[in-house]
Image: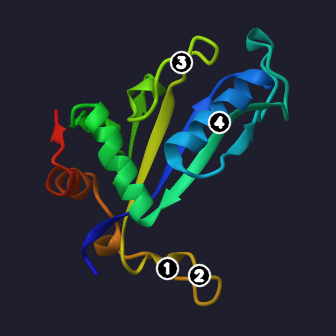
Amino acid sequence: MQKVHVDKIVIHMGVGEAGEKLVKAENIMQEISGQKSVRTIAKRTQPAFSIRKDQPIGCKVCLRGKAAEDFVRTSLEILEKKLYASQFDKSGNLAYGIEEHTDFPGQSYDPMIGIYGMDVNVVLEKKGIRIARRSIQKKKLPLKQRVSREEAVKFMQEEFGVEVQ
């Protein structure tokens, strides 16, 4: 019950506008992750960036299980297995960015598409977290079942061979 595992990964690409640019980003996301992406919409209007509320401005994909672990391994190879301690939050989750989609295997630069970056958010959990999420007899999650920052760093070092600076 105390073993930490990767629950899910959310990969997000923000392009800032709808249209052809967003469609290209969705196609790239599908090639990289192997799943169809979901569009993200703007929560509020920001005239400085020409963004209106409820306008689609990005796409995201959620990976779980074996696909999630494979994606983490691939993306950490791109980062040369180096992470910073500031990329881990107090709940044991971590987030990092990948500057170019062309770094992934099988991807090449195409001037018609351009270069897109992405954010990767990794959620780490222990077994037994369901007691805090279920609808009947919901309980507070005990401290020993929560993933701390130190446990997350140790897990990433042991499981994926990451160097944390």
Taking 23 as reference, is 150 above or below it? Answer: below
- Residue 41 falls left or right of residue 150: right
Mark found first going from the N terminus, 4 or 2: 4
Q: Is residue 88 above or below residue 3?
A: above
Q: Earlier in the sequence, mark 3 or mark 1?
A: 3
Q: For the residues marked 4 and 2, what is the alpha-carbon distance in whole angstroms? A: 35 Å
Q: Are marks 1 and 2 in contact (CB under 8 Å)?
A: yes
Please name the residue shown 35% across and 67% down the image: 146
Image position of 159 (left or right of 113): left
Residue 135 seen: yes
Q: Which residue is mark 2?
A: 134
Q: Which residue type does callout 3 highlight?
A: Ile
Label 1 and label 2: CA atoms lie apart by 6 Å
Depth check, mark 4 against mark 2: the one in front is 4
Residue type indicated by callout 4: Asn
> Where does the image place residue 42, in percent across and percent down from the top left?
76, 33
- Name the foreground residue: 70 vs 151: 70
Query: Which dot, 3 or 2, sits closer to the camera?
Result: 3
The residue tagged 3 is: 115
